[in-house]
Image (tube, rainbow, N blue to C red):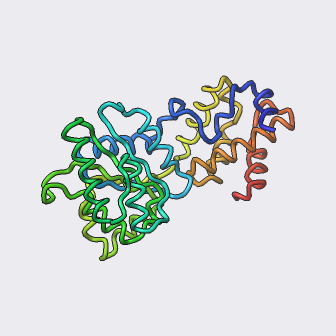
């Protein structure tokens, strides 16, 4: 079905598909804000927090930033399996850094810190640990993150740790047991999702990038797509893709609000 609308609308690929190259990213305000905070953290070290509602594009925002890093001066460790025990987390972290995991947590803790120190002082690299889906982390892991980031009696920030998760993570960190970690945050941003104007600009920009007519969707159609997506990039992409399929099936050169409504109904988004 996707091939049908690609041919019909003269597209080189589906502009709203998952896994598009990062160089096709549309520069939304959320993307700019996330990039600015991640760059700041990478330079200074410390702990940062990026939160968003599901589908807002937080992982994509991190990926577009990471793809722009110079591998000679930056070491990025990305962990996304957050439903793990404390010991499993240490093993994941060791493997991400290229360190042989030990049998004891204390040994792995020392090995992780030694590796980070070597990368920073000897190789002159900035080390950033990104933990995705961090709202699933156990309390014991959150507590240990403070100690992992503690170098030279907490006098130096050699490691940047970025917690990326759903909006509930910020509420979770505001609770008394995690007050110490919350106070250590040096950067924080909650992604707001696409505004109506941004959604229209995003859709037309992405259509243009794949060789299609940017005016396939009229203004009312784009407003309707944004309205049923609630600012979520993921849901917007799903609605637009389904609307393109419906439009191609009807041999319609322009997609109107009714087609978008039908597309949203099929996806049970209204």
Is residue 155 or residue 256 the one in the foreground? 155
Is residue 232 or residue 165 the one in the foreground? 165
Residue at the far bottom: name it: 176
Q: In the image, is residue 155 above or below residue 44? A: below
Q: Position of residue 71 (x, y in %)?
A: 36, 32
Q: Is residue 81 left or right of residue 257?
A: left
Residue at the far front: name it: 103
Q: Position of residue 29 (x, y in %)?
A: 43, 42
Q: Position of residue 147 (x, y in %)?
A: 25, 63
Q: Quadrant of the N terminus?
A: top right
Is residue 24 or residue 263 the one in the foreground? 24
Q: Position of residue 101 (x, y in %)?
A: 38, 56
What is the total number of numbered labels drawn onto the structure image? 0
Q: In the image, is residue 116 above or below residue 178? A: above
Q: In the image, is residue 80 above or below residue 221? A: below
Q: Quadrant of the C terminus?
A: bottom right
Residue at 87 percent of width and 37 percent of height: 250
Q: Quadrant of residue 144?
A: bottom left
Q: In the image, is residue 82 above or below residue 216? A: below
Residue at 64 percent of width and 26 percent of height: 210
Q: Is residue 208 left or right of residue 264?
A: left
């Amino acid at each position: 079905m996707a091939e049908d609308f690609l041919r019909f609308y003269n597209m080189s690929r589906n502009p709203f598909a998952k896994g598009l190259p990062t160089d096709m990213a549309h520069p939304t305000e959320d993307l700019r804000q996330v990039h600015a905070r991640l760059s700041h953290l990478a330079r200074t070290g410390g702990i940062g927090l990026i939160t968003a509602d599901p589908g807002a594009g937080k992982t994509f925002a991190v990926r577009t930033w990471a793809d722009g890093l110079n591998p000679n001066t930056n070491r990025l460790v990305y962990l996304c399996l957050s439903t793990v025990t404390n010991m499993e987390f240490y093993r994941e972290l060791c493997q991400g850094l290229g360190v042989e995991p030990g049998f004891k947590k204390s040994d792995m803790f020392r090995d992780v810190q030694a590796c980070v120190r070597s990368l920073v002082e000897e190789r002159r690299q900035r080390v950033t640990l990104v933990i995705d889906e961090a709202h699933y982390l156990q309390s014991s892991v959150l507590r240990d993150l403070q100690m992992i980031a503690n170098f030279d009696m907490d006098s130096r920030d050699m490691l940047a740790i970025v917690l990326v998760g759903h909006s509930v993570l910020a509420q979770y960190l505001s609770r008394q047991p995690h007050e110490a970690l919350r106070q250590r945050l040096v950067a924080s941003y909650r992604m707001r999702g696409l505004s109506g104007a941004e959604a229209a600009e995003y859709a037309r920009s992405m259509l243009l990038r794949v060789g299609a007519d940017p005016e396939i969707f009229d203004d009312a159609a784009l407003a309707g797509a944004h309205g049923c997506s609630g600012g979520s990039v993921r849901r917007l992409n799903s609605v637009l893709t389904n609307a393109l399929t419906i439009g191609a099936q009807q041999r319609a050169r322009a997609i109107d609000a009714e087609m978008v409504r039908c597309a949203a109904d099929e996806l049970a988004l209204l």
